Amino acid sequence: MFGLCLCVGFSAMAQNVEEEYSAAYANKRGVYLLPQAGDFALGVDATPFLRYMGNFFTSGNNVAPFFKDVNGFNQTLYGKYFLQDDRAIRARLTVSVLNATDKGVIRNDVAFFDDAASTATLFDIQRESSTMLELGAGYEFRRGHGRVQGFWGGEVALGFSSEKFSYDYANRITDENETPSTYDFGWNFSNYRTTEVKPGNAIYFGLGAFAGVEYFFAPQMSLGGEVGLGFGFSTTGQGQMTRERWDTDALRVEIDKYGNWENAQNIAVGTRTSGRIFLMFHF
């Protein structure tokens, strides 16, 4: 009888331990899976990693994670602080940087003027650079069962972007060749060719809502995704274009401005959707 009671006692203890450290909330070592009040979380956009692993099975160019492509960087960083087990304040920072170079094949005018049968060619070059920063802050509610947690909330966002194009032309403008062969990258005009374009800097402000699902595959480590719908406005400042042409007996360079801070057509109001996949670490 004593042995039977002892076995029943151990069985009950084991059952209580198993319930306390259920796989839904803790691993077999008793390490709790889910975030609790006072915890911090840091994360990154998981899309570049998924793309990187997926490209192993294709013949395409496999760009390392954190890079937008071979010409730039694109990544979103996430941070959270849990006020309660089921509520958190959150922030995100998106950084996108692009530096790209394009070449256009054009005739070598010097060689052609020396010999009309010449097929010699040169390259005109376009250099593009852009930077985009966006900071978001929000409040998050959470609910779930075990490893799967749903969340929703609201967010405010502030963004900034700038862009620049510059051009190097192989055939120079001279008194003997006032309209040299030039590759058209889209900014040239009849009697001018563009050497630099600086579109006006843009500022964005918005309000939005989000909802998503997060799965804790290991203690304090999760993979999740969310979608969002926002409303906001953006405004674009004054831009600048530098152009050159031959004027009578000399090279003439002109700087033109376009756009205006007070011009209503440069203010855009509308909705914006978003979707993200992220990897989070809680501590």
Image (cartoon, grey):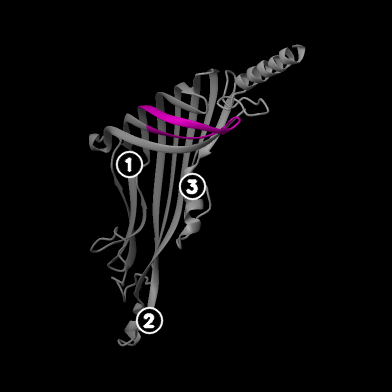
Q: Which residues are magenta?
A: 208-227
Q: Are marks 1 and 2 in contact (CB under 8 Å)?
A: no
Q: Earlier in the sequence, mark 2 or mark 3?
A: 3
Pick out the residue farthest to the right. 2
Q: Amino acid at mark 1?
A: Gln
Residue at label 1? 238
The spot of residue 188 in percent (x, y) is 28, 60
Callout 2 amino acid: Ala
Determine which residue is flagged by label 2.
Answer: 120
Residue 268 in view, yes or no: yes
Q: Residue at x 36, y 78 (%)?
A: 108
Q: How many numbered marks, from 0 up? A: 3
In this rendered view, identify the residue nearer to me: 248 or 105.
Answer: 105
Quadrant assignment, res 132? top left
Tell whether 133 sits left or right of 1: left
Q: Is residue 62 visible?
A: no
210 and 97: which is toward the camera = 210
What amino acid type should be assigned to the residue bearing mark 3? Leu
Q: Residues within 10 Å of mark 2 (few under 14, many from 20)?
A: few
Q: Which numbered disc, 3 or 1, marks the residue closer to the eye?
A: 3
At 52% from the left edge and 28% from the top edge, which residue is drawn? Answer: 147
Label 3: how many Cα within 10 Å (few below 14, some 14–19, many 20+): few
Percent position (x, y) of residue 83? 54, 17
Mark closer to the chain start, 1 or 2: 2
Q: Is residue 28 above or below residue 113?
A: above
Gap in angstroms between the C-alphas marked 2 and 3 = 45 Å
